[in-house]
Amino acid sequence: MTECFNSEFKEQLPELAAGTVEYPIPVEHHVASCSHCTAELEILRVVRQAAIPVPSIHVSKIVRALPPAPIPVREEKPWYRRASLQMAAAFLLVAGGLYSVRQAGDRMVASSSDVSVAAAPAAQVAQVQSSPDQAPPPAGSTAADSRAVVAQGAPRSDIALVTGLDEFTTQELSILLQDVDALAAVPVSEPDEFSPVNSNDVQGEG
């Protein structure tokens, strides 16, 4: 048995065995004259008969047998849950507003306190300068003695100076003391004291 090299007919042998070849007559004539193709066709027919047929699949029947897809239903939330969410949102809104107002008030109080602290040393120095009872310190007196004289001569100013000193910083107190020392060194502009002269004494001496 010689091998067949006619590939056109050899490729159609499975279709001829299955009976699905489009033009079977030319293929059958070739098989009748070729012993190699005849033997191969017999093998294909035997294998086909031994094979278990696969059941056909009906896609439409399978689709109809499937259960219908569930329709999504929007779940309604109970009224009390909606009300609680609204109350929580309102509470957060009110709390945020109160916090903002409180922060603004704290900033205003802090700024007014800074202005009062800055203005207090100047006002107290002006009080000391305007005191009419202040006398110049004696020669050789120190700054501490000058401050003592100022405190004795002007009790009202002393009250003004002592009140609230714990609120001043060290730098502010130092500036205040320097101003007081400078004020104590200013000469007195009052005229010198004089004794009245008796006219009788003058005549007696004459």
Image (spheres, grey):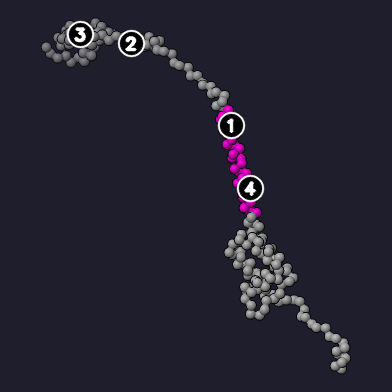
Dot 4 or dot 1: first in sequence order is: 1
| Residue range (magenta) | 83-112
Classify mark 3: residues with Cα within 10 Å, few (<14), some (14-19) or many (20+): few
- At x 64%, y 50%, the residue is 108
Quadrant (top left, top right, bottom left, bottom right) of the C terminus: bottom right
Q: Amino acid at mark 1?
A: Met
Task: Give the mark nearer the N terminus: 3 vs 1.
Answer: 3
Quadrant containing the N terminus is top left
Residues at circles 3 and 4 in contact by the CB criterion of under 8 Å: no
Residue 19 at what x, y percent from top left? 25, 6
Q: Estimate the spatial distance between the alpha carbons at disc 3 and disc 2, rounded to whole Å.
A: 21 Å
The answer to which quarter of the image holds residue 201 is bottom right
- Give the CA distance from mark 1 to mark 2: 61 Å
According to the image, label 4 marks what residue?
105
Q: What residue sits right under mark 2 in the picture?
A: 57
Neighbours of disc 2 within 10 Å: few (<14), some (14-19), many (20+)? few
Which residue type does callout 2 highlight?
Ile
CA distance separating discs 2 and 4: 82 Å
Q: Indicate which disc residue 50 carries.
A: 3
The residue nearer to you, when weighing 202 against 48, is 202
